[in-house]
Image (cartoon, rainbow, N blue to C red):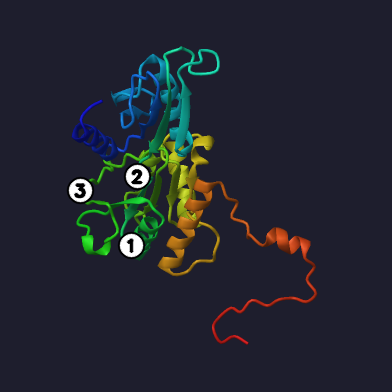
Amino acid sequence: MPDRPALLDLMTELRERREPHALATVVEATGSTSAHPGDKALIDAGGQVLTGWVGGGCAEGNVRQTALEALGDGVPRLIYLDLDDEVLGTGMPCGGAMRVFVEPLLPPPALWVLGHGRVTEALCRFGATLGFRVIVHDTPAPDPLRYPDAAAIIGDDDEYARLQPLGADAVIIATQHKGDHLSAVRALRSQAGYVAIVASNKRAGLMRDFLRDEGFSDNELARLRAPAGLDLRARTPEEIAFAVMGEVVMLRRGGTGAPLNASAAARTPTTKPVRVLDAVGDT
């Protein structure tokens, strides 16, 4: 296997490039195995061993397949490889047995926030709290003090060439009409799993018309969440940002947005109406 610094350097490079990968570590070995406890291998998203060693043909194929499965669902696995049994084991009687821990290393999803103002600042704060790597795009001269939770701030990219989201990323356009047509085109042509525009219904309709003229089909436009967010009757910038991030989480986790007590309420008869107070001090 490579020396530890070289392995860590490669892992750092993969993380900086936001490339998913898995680390396989031999945690137990008995018999005449070619790998030993502590041996490691780094495996990319295609299932190829980038560096390291966890055994030859007897074990590597199983470890690579397990790495692909782990990268698919994000769940680590501890596998047992019987290298003595060619029928029920790894397929070749190499001798011995191993336990290998396979850990998926997935880059955190990025939240690309485009624009400026209190909504953008709140989106940055909420996104970081929810575990996103927040990238703020605010031109021409963003103030870093307004985005203390941002992992990166872009202020010199009027054409949005640096807007390069991955499939797990979310893009929220809150530019208040400035360049939103350019950023929306680029976002919809990317792999981003969530693309939204903070805008009025009228502006959202105009944007859809523009994007349709740009050649986007109805199926492609269905990806666009405009106006962005859940219907919370949000009024303040913070409430608007909260509603948008609620939609991001809902779609990311496969939620419905329905009240959690809806099914319970359907089963429990209400004997008298319950009034929800509209404001503090309402009686």
**Residue 56, relative to residue 178: is it above or below?**
above
Identify the disc placed on residue 279.
none
* Residue named by callout 1: 121
Task: Tell me how far mark 1 sits from mark 2, CA to CA.
Answer: 19 Å
* Residue named by callout 3: 156
Q: Residue at x 42, y 13 (%)?
A: 94
Please, what is the three-letter code of the amino acid marked with disc 1? Glu
Q: Residue at x 22, y 58 (%)?
A: 142
Residue 95 is situated, as x and y percent measured from the top left of the image, at 42, 16
**Residue 125, relative to residue 46: is it above or below?**
below
Task: Tell me how far mark 3 sits from mark 1, CA to CA.
Answer: 19 Å
Residue 184 is situated, as x and y percent measured from the top left of the image, at 39, 44
Q: Residue at x 26, y 40 (%)?
A: 16
Please, what is the three-letter code of the amino acid marked with disc 3? Asp
Residue 12 is situated, as x and y percent measured from the top left of the image, at 24, 38
The one nearer the camera, 89 or 130, is 89
Q: Secondary structure at mark 2?
A: helix
* Residue named by callout 2: 183
